[in-house]
Image: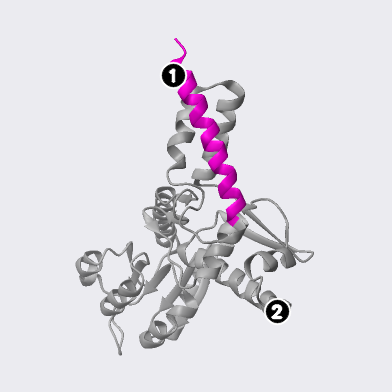
Amino acid sequence: MRIILVDDEAPLLREMAELLSCYPDFELAGSYTDPLQALEELEATRPELAFLDIEMRTMDGIELAERLLANNPELDVLFVTAYNQYAVMAFEINAIDYLLKPVRPERLEKAVERIRRKRRRTQEAKKLQIQFFGKFTLYYGSEAVKWSRSKPRELLAYLLANESIWMDKYKICDDLWPDSPPHQALRNLQTAVWAIRKCLRDYGISSIQISYANDSYLLKVAAGQWDLRQYDKAFTLYMQADSYAAGQEAAELYREGYLAYEDWRWALQRRADYVLKQRELLTGLSADKKVP
């Protein structure tokens, strides 16, 4: 978990950093005596948890917390202060905890466990969903992943379509950038892979991993709901075990066709293949209904 510390007294910052060094799942991304600098460097630090002093000279911790949360509503805030009269204000902005200085290791341990429990609940509530039928979309929890550019989105769909297969980088370039010179296509590929990794990291999606070796890329999905995978599994079960329920499940998952709204040349043959599979499925289900 990436954390930042903000306290206008440098010795106290060092003390807190030393206490937190005992927790290997905490990564110190930034330590600041100036709250304004902490705000300026948010894009670089990308904190998930902020330990904030309340009484500081240039900006009090309550205001700093409000500005941090405006930038990232999912950030967890924990106040560390010598004064307990701010407790009500702290919890009004949903601070996860409130520690009094000097911080005792045993009290910090309780706060850390509270943070971990909250994070576990949040991660359990946020499940990855991949949609291939209709419009290609990734959902993390109830939120659709947004893309600033179209090519990283297309490349992710392409790698997902070839999940668990090592894809040669030159083959990828031919499929996604057929009209670009080879050197430019390779640069485009590298940029798109970087953009995918950054987007997944920004959303906290760790169940999709992209590896690179021997001039090839490999994507794997560790966990999540994927309509295409569910369809293939249900279709196979129907065809091999004559499970009418599985056939109905597959038929309902199909919705509007394989990447139906995407104008991607590499997807055309697969779209046609799924049209034939769905036609075969519906014919079989219709015949099954007529059997007395």
Quadrant holding the C terminus: top left
Q: Position of residue 28 (x, y in %)?
A: 52, 73
Q: Residue at x 63, y 76 (%)?
A: 188
**Residue 270 is a magenta residue:** yes
Asked if residue 173 lies left or right of residue 258, the reply is right
Q: Give the residue type at disc 1.
A: Lys
- Visible residue check, residue 98: yes
As helix, strand or loop, the secondary structure at mark 1 comes to helix
Residue 187 picture location, percent across and down: 66, 78
Residue sitting farthest toward the right: 214
Amino acid at the residue labelled 2: Pro
Query: Residue sitting at 60 percent across and 44 percent down?
Result: 273
- Magenta span: chief secondary structure: helix
Which of disc 2 and disc 1 is earlier in sequence? 2
| Residue 105 drawn above or below residue 285 | below
Name the residue tied to disc 1. 289
Pointer 2: what residue? 181
Front residue of this view, candidates 278 and 12: 278
Dot 2: within a 10 Å radius of its alpha carbon, few (fewer than 14), some, or many (20 or more) residues?
A: few
